[in-house]
Image (tube, rainbow, N blue to C red):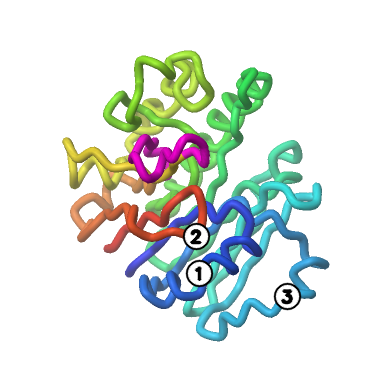
Amino acid sequence: MKIISWNVNGIRACMRNGFVEVLAQLDPDIILLQEIKIDDAARAQHDFDLPAYEEYWYPAERKGYSGTAILSKKPISVTNGFGWPEYDGEGRVQTADAGDFWVVNAYFPNSRGDLSRLGFKEKFNEVLLGYLKELEKTKPVIIGGDFNVAREEIDLARPKENTQNPGFTKEERYWGREYLKSGLIDSFRYLHPDKIQYSWWSYRALARVRNIGWRIDYFFVSEILAAKLKSAIIYDELKGSDHCPIGVEL
């Protein structure tokens, strides 16, 4: 099974920038989307022309903000939200029953430039991890999405300059490590221990052209699935958003 995750930073903009072509090229069984920035009313006005996929959309209550979606070649059971209204109102977590395992689509909060949402994000990390461990009591979990954190220095181009910046604070990095301590595995780092590759670049200062990026998009899997990992890929040559797609294959 091939699963892709992509923060599209607005599905309408990404559609204009080649989303359909990228989807056809990657040909995943399931694709997880974050930051769709569209509600049901606005989506009804657009024909996204995705006949090969069943669509499960989870918009935020606030228009043009946040939100997630799952596209699957086969019909699957998808639950929107995970029981925390302050996060569910922003459309941040979806859970799909993929048969042998759960697939969780997650868009972690950004702590903001002034770190005013750091506490909000820390709590999200805490309650989501608890939710994942409850799911694991029934079967293994794959969680993919934009975690909005570069966990280690290898995961961003300029770690020393960013120690106090959102996405690389000690608090955010702590939670990135807590997920691994809980028994989850970072699929990309598990298969590529020393590889330097990024999944997000600022739109400023030609960051993508210069490859001044961050690895903040991940697939974490339950430890029992490690032996089944065939590949974990960052498709950094593919464009359409300030993030690139990432993938895992079992």
Separation of marks 2 and 1 at Cα, in angstroms: 6 Å
Sequence-wise first label, 3 or 1? 1
> Few, some or many C-alpha atoms within 10 Å of disc 2 (few <14, some 14-19, many ≥20)?
many
> Which contiguous range is marked in magenta?
202-217
Sequence-wise first label, 3 or 2? 3
- The amino acid type found where label 1 is placed reads Gly
Q: x, y (%) of residue 147?
A: 48, 39
Q: Is residue 136 a member of the stretch shown in magenta?
A: no
Circles 2, 1 touching at the beta carbon (< 8 Å): yes
Residue pointed to by mark 1: 18
Residue pointed to by mark 2: 240
Q: Image point 52% across, 41% down: which residue?
A: 203
- For the question of whether residue 74 can be seen, the reply is yes
Residue pointed to by mark 3: 46
Sequence-wise first label, 2 or 1? 1
Separation of marks 3 and 1 at Cα, in angstroms: 15 Å
Residue 202 or residue 113, whichever sits in front: 202
Above-or-below relation of 34 to 49: above
Q: Image point 41% across, 29% down: which residue?
A: 176
Q: x, y (%) of residue 122?
A: 57, 24
Q: Say whether residue 54 is left or right of residue 30.
A: right
